[in-house]
Image (tube, grey):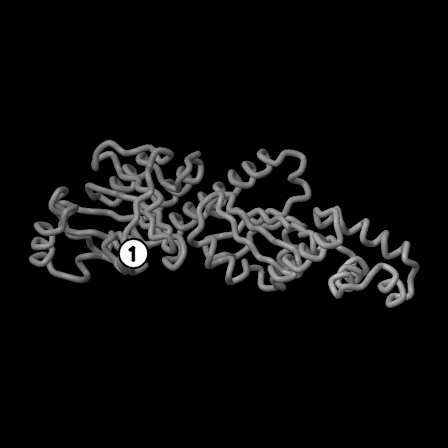
């Protein structure tokens, strides 16, 4: 079966109007009402999911389902177990393809949603990747079975909804980035900021972010490092991920669902020069300044100067305290 010209025109008109809508999510109640009318069913529902955290991050319904909670007030809900929060884990599904009307009548009486809304058939599809983040658009019918025209109509809508969903993520990234820049003011110019998509692919990174990722992880494939991707999938805004190496610390902080800021900190150990560390290591062996000077072939005054420079870097004032501090920092590397 091929869709009628009027159906195709309606799909394109809907997509154009949806792209012009200024909303936090890809679809609104008004747009879902329009889709329900286009499909010829009673209900249309749009949900978004964060799979690593097993969270439903948005639930938007058509007006037939009742008063809808504004998206900015929607509380995240969570599920447990391996079962998805909607009725199928497939990318596209029509309930009447899976079971006959008698079985669906039975399900209508047993399933909570079906019983309340008297659903006899459902068709839905996914946008995005189920392993990370995704969206699900579903149509529900109270009286008739969905037919081949409805299947083709849903498949025609699917790429447009996928594009709308991805655009909503991009908008969220921009809002998060603007929030980071606004919070940090003029200092943000040198900050390392990374915008990434649902699969951990880097959409944008500042020059400083590229430098730090390459220096700390050897980044080459345009994606967040594996260990960072695993962490960020479960992290919330404000959470930090810390890596320590050679006396330096790299901290990644979640600015939002798709934004990271990176900051590198040199510890006291990293701030010491090679010669200052060498002198302190000889002090730890019990050598005097004169003995260290003979060992290094320098003047005793030079040894004293190295120690004088090292003390404030370590936050100490004596030889004994400097040796103790150096030992503690070396053990924590």
Q: Considering only vertical position in the picture, is 4 above or below 82? A: above
Determine whether 10 is above or below 72 in the image.
below
Q: Quadrant of the C terminus?
A: bottom right
Q: Position of residue 122 (x, y in %)?
A: 20, 51
Q: Judge by depth and name the residue closer to the eye, 159 or 210.
A: 210
The residue lying at 24 percent from left, 47 percent from top is 139
> Does residue 239 appear to the left or right of 189 in the view shown?
left
Q: Is residue 285 left or right of residue 3?
A: right
Residue 155 point in image, percent of width and height = 32, 55
Identified at 60% across, 37% down, the residue is 181
Q: Which residue is mark 1?
A: 2
Q: Is residue 240 shown left or right of residue 91?
A: right
Which image quadrant is residue 298 in? bottom right
Q: Position of residue 237 (x, y in %)?
A: 47, 43
Q: Residues within 10 Å of mark 1 (few under 14, many from 20)?
A: few
Q: Residue at 71%, 57% (x, y): give it.
A: 323
Q: Quick one: 5 or 137, which is closer to the camera?
A: 137
Q: Is residue 219 visible?
A: no
């Amino acid at each position: 079966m091929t869709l009628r010209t009027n159906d195709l025109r309606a799909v394109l008109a809907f997509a154009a109007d949806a792209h012009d809508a200024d909303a936090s999510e890809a679809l609104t109640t008004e747009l879902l009402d329009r889709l329900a009318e286009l499909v010829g069913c009673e209900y249309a529902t749009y949900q978004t999911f964060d799979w690593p955290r097993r969270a439903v991050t948005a639930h938007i319904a058509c007006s037939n389902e009742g008063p809808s909670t504004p998206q900015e007030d929607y509380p995240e809900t969570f599920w447990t177990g391996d079962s998805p929060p909607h009725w199928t884990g497939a990318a596209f599904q029509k309930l009447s393809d899976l079971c006959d009307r008698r079985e669906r009548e039975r399900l209508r009486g047993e399933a909570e949603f079906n019983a309340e809304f008297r659903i006899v058939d459902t068709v839905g599809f996914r946008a995005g990747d189920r392993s990370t983040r995704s969206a699900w658009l579903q149509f529900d019918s109270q009286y008739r079975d969905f037919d081949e025209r409805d299947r083709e109509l849903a498949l025609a809508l699917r790429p447009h909804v996928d594009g709308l969903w991805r655009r909503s993520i991009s908008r969220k990234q921009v809002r998060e980035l603007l929030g980071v820049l606004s919070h940090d003011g003029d200092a943000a110019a040198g900050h390392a900021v990374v915008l990434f998509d649902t699969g951990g692919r880097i959409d944008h990174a500042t020059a400083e972010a590229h430098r730090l990722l390459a220096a700390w992880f050897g980044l080459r494939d345009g994606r967040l490092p594996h260990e960072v991707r695993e962490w960020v999938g479960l992290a919330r805004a404000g959470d930090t991920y810390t890596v320590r190496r050679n006396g330096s610390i790299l901290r990644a902080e979640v600015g939002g669902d798709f934004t990271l800021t990176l900051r590198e900190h040199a510890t006291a150990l990293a701030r010491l020069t090679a010669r200052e560390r060498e002198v302190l290591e000889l002090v730890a062996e019990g050598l005097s300044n004169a003995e260290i000077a003979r060992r290094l072939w320098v003047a005793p005054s030079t040894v004293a100067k190295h120690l004088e420079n090292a003390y404030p870097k370590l936050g100490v004032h004596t030889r004994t305290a400097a040796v103790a501090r150096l030992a503690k920092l070396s053990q924590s590397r």
